[in-house]
Image (cartoon, rainbow, N blue to C red):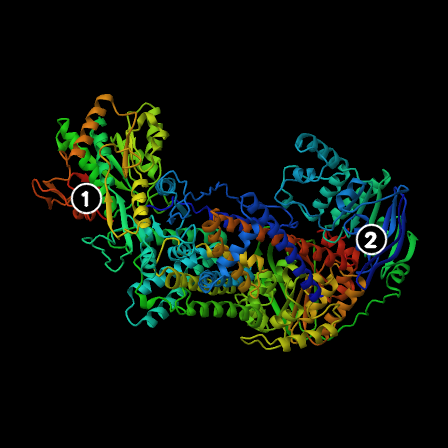
Amino acid sequence: MSGASQRSGIQAMVIAVAGATMIAALLLWALGANPLEAFKLLFEGSFGSMSKLSATLLVWVPLVIASASLVITYSTGLWNIGVEGQIIMGAIFATWAARTIPGPGWVVMLAGIILGIVGGMLWALLAGVLKTHGGVNEIFGGLGLYFVALGLTTYLVIGPWSREGVASTSGTDLFDADVWFPRIGSLDVSWLSLLLAIIAIGGVYFVMRGTMFGLKLKSVGNNMASSARLGIPSNRYMLGAFAVAGGLAGLAGTTQAMAFHHKLVPSVSGGFGFLGILVVLLAGFRAAPVAPLALFFAALSVGASQLELRLDLDSSVGGVIQGTLVLFVMLATGWQRRRAENRAAAEAGGSN
Amino acid sequence: MLELIDIHKHFGPVRANDGVTMRVEAGTIHGLLGENGAGKSTLMKVLAGFISADSGEILLGGEPLEVSNPKESVTAGIGLLHQDPLLCLPFSVLENFMLGRPESFVLDPDTARTELEDLAARFDFQFLADATARSLTVGERQQLEILRLLSLGVRVLILDEPTTAISATQRALLFATLRKLAEEGMTVIFVSHKLEEIDEICDTATVLRAGQVTGEVVLPVSSSELVSLMFGKAIIPEERTDVDLGEPVVDLRNITAIERLVRLQDVSLTARAGEVIGLAGLAGSGQQTMLKVCAGQRKPDAGTVVVHGEDVTRSSYNHHMGIGVHWLPADRLGEGLVEGLSVTEHFALAGDTPQGFVVDWAGAGEEAATKISHFSVKGTTESTPESLSGGNQQRLLLAMMPDHVELLLMEHPTRGLDIESAEWVWHQILERRNDGTAIVFSSADLDELLRYSDRILVFFAGRVLRELVAADADAEELGYLIGGKERE
Amino acid sequence: MKVSNGRTWRRWAVLLVAFALIGAACSDDGDSGDTTAAPDDSTETTAAVSEDPLKFGMILVGPRDDRGYSQAHFEGGEYVEAKLGAEMIVVDSLNPADKPETTVEQVVADMIDQGAQLVIATSDDMKDGIELSAAANTDVPMIWVSGDSAWVDGEAYRDDLTNLGNVFGRMEFGKMIAGCAAALTTETGQIGYLGPLINDETRRLVASAYLGARHCWEQEGNSADDLEFTVTWIGFWFQIPGVTLDPTQVVNEFYDGGVDVILSGIDTTEAIVRGGQRAEAGESVWAIPYDFEGACAEAESICLGVPYFNWGPSYLGIAESVADGSFTAEFQWLGPDWADINDKDTSTIGWITGDAVAADDVEKLDAFIAGLADGSINPWTGPLNFQDGSPFLADGEVASDLQIWYLDQLLEGIDGASSS
């Protein structure tokens, strides 16, 4: 049964990818580009060389961590739209560490990681408490807190943490080079970021699959009332989910500040939280498919800059291809799920 | 004349309909009877275009009926009324009425309003066209859906277990409506597993068992004949056995709990070990609230709850669980089981396997396998509750009950179950009773209350109107009391 | 210098799609189609003319068609293409909001891969990236527009980056002319300056506008003490709700408080738009927009003129020097071509006098411009004090480039904050 549904899932996926590719090809053709060449550029621009692969992984890290965070909240039935804000708070806290904590580089990095996690966690818990104790839906609470966090970075960057004389979106001064996350050779990507990303997604996979905490989160997410009957305090577990997810988002923010920008910039979250929502939707809210899907999205984003450079296309074409693909996959899985539901409903048919 | 001829519908190895033939004269009310899983719903879904048959033929007025979806089927004149019609809740009654009409793109609310009001008046239905669908009771939703189907011109009306969730008054009104429709020439198919209803409303009936027709009858016939057609054997209800009562397990004193619609006021109740107490009353008379207070799900506004001498009035629900209070809600999927979680996962959460940081999948899986086989749950350890039938959901809930329960609280323990499942469920419950568990349950089924309770508390408007010793009471008296009247 | 004016629509599009999908995922029939935003940017390709054309990269912070700062650079690049037969590779909207996945270093590396012999980073924001890139590719000439890294006397001189030059326009002249036009026109003697955020560049531009205004005000026989010149900083180059002041509200408060001419220093058009609306309602108000040659079109009848950048000539010079191998990392701070400040082939900054300047004032304004041109007028001449009363320039002392570039306080006579 599960083998069959997996097969039809893969079938739906193949149909979706084929459909999306066709639409993308048509679009590129309409824009006057050779679709084959464009696809080749997309691939070469993201995996074609070590430095391109490194650029892709640089994007993959925050995306996969943010997606891991979202898996936790989605499993608990929470739409943590505020993930962007939590990433930003993580970056702010990490920046504070990088700017003020003295000591050798590894101490500052460790402090940055811990504080980043704390920052994201606090911001998420705020959204959580607003929901559990204030009755504010987490979508609105999270969105509101996102704007507050956004305002706070902008304020910090052009205010207290601005560069000498020149305040602008260029962000704060670069951190000292010894607190930049250590890179792999001459590549841009840091092995420490990669390690953190793998720990994050691996950890979430384990928590959701193997721990009572994960199982209870899933239970609360699927049915709060029944979970309460089984003795699972839903508010406490929702806050737990917010704390863990916020911590992860904060970690994503830390990598953005300490491994990507090496400073605080106003848009430090890079929209990876929102992009993570798409990744997790496509992953069916499960942890396992997140890593490859995030890699695919990262590659598409990074590769798309080649379309602009080489073909003089607007680089947002990459975003459109991405959106088309997501749409197709959602339609295909929705269609497949509905078929499965119809079948299940019909099988249960006799039982009134 | 509606004819279904040799309908086959298989789901994998399951033969849901295995050559069913059924004929219904126009202007009659035809019953479709069978236990859970007999294939009633599948047959009706085929008829209404929700699923297509593997083979077979449907003739309406002698013409072959070719429909591939519900919309076409409505156009062809066949309408299916769901148990709980899926209305668009934020919309008004009128807007729901207008949904699905083959109208032009522009809506014409005035005509629709007149039509709605005329139809409603014809059947004595009373609702406001501008009220939101959310504010309607299940019975009123059915009424609205019937009117909507009528306005779409259906000639065959299928009702799938329509009385499960509606009040007695609404049931009477529904039956009156059906009779009126039949007199006007409408073909009505009434799907049910309740013998008395079939007997009360239908002219003729078809009985299904395991996907096949086991009988076509012209009513009235004896209940025992119908039962043997349904089950292939006659079911003998369990004989009443009384056990010696032990110490009081729970003592509720002067409980007051005010809710939006229910005002439970000054109610007391004591249940002793081995005692079965039935709570009777119309929905919303306070018995549900009483059970919730007892379970620790809701703190009373006044009064005390004592379990085994310990005052637990202010204690949490989890504390109640810890001292052996167990609660089985009526809404099995809504409040009892967690959809999307497998049976094994349920046992990992609630079973006797000890909980650590890491889930003991092996232990939980083993427990699940043992329990579902012991409780005859038709499913696997990987099944999710929403894929189980109502009876199997209740079996799973019972299977998940801890070994040691002092006080078992149940809402409508057999609602929606066929006779066989209901008997089985009570058999399990009474075994617990024999081990000294105190049992308090609410039910709308008078026979159930009378048969299994030692005492019955009749609730009316938030108070206990009367306490009866079940052995001395009869259904008629109970019925009057539930309606708030003493027998004349 | 400038940033994209909030083109974060991409992020919103993603969020919107997410919500649409949430909707689709929740509804029973998940087959409702949703559409994503599709770009309508038309694209052009330019063909190489000569056999072995110069290739150069142009990195823009905003969209290439923003009718403002980035478009001016883009058109400068097109000018080079036309004049030199060169080929331009463009990446636009490069900022962390619009292209979070891309860094300046990556773009520069890609451009060099593609054969770019010169890379121009057009925004102040790109400092870190272009400096890192210059250090990593010492054989490729690069330009950081608005920067000071190649200024030997400057505060941030990088003698190690011998391949990174700077270029900027002396917008101070444009702002002085604007200030003069404002002073000639004002009836109330109150001029408002709608400032973005506070830094060296914006301080020197506000001071220039003030000095130009004071000069022409005194020429008219008024006392400098009677001139009220106020700057209100909104906090950023454009409005960010909740973070900056609302420019429209600032404009309204200026006009309500007796200011009748507003000079805009921000990216967006609130001053001229709101001024135009109030003028239609019968008020005597005027405005001076910024940056885009065609900006007066928003409300011709109240527009006193507009100062703008014209990057073509400076970019052409740099490109030629790269082509013939004579490129050196220089700091260039280029003024207008006084022979014709609107000559597209020679003048790095320009000024277009608006229709709303009275005929006799046009003559006076032209005289002021002529004075600036021949050096007979230099408003940056002492005695001048800083805003806090401390001396800036002694009597007769002329401000040096360093003093103007790194002006760290506003001048006496200007109301408004000198630092944030």
Residue C271 locus on image (x, y percent): 32, 34
Q: Nearer the viewer, residue A214 or C398?
A: C398
Query: Which chain letter goes with mark 1?
Result: C
User: Which amino acid type is shown beneath numbered disc 2?
Assistant: Ala
Quadrant, the C terminus of chain A = bottom right
Q: Mark 1 points at which residue?
A: C410
Mark sitting on residue B368: none
Q: In which quarter of the image is residue C84?
A: top left
Give the label, 1 or 2, closer to the camera: 1
Distance from the alpha carbon under mark 1 to that under mark 2:
86 Å
Is residue A43 rendered to the left or right of residue C176?
right
Query: What is the three-letter code of the residue carrying label 1?
Result: Leu
In this view, the residue in front, B296 or B211, is B211
Between B4 and A248, the residue placed more toward the observer is A248
Q: In which quarter of the image is residue A255?
A: bottom left
Location of residue B114 with respect to C81 vertically, above or below: above
Name the side, left or right, on which A33 lies relative to B47. Answer: left
Q: Residue furthest top?
A: C359
Quadrant assignment, res A293: bottom right
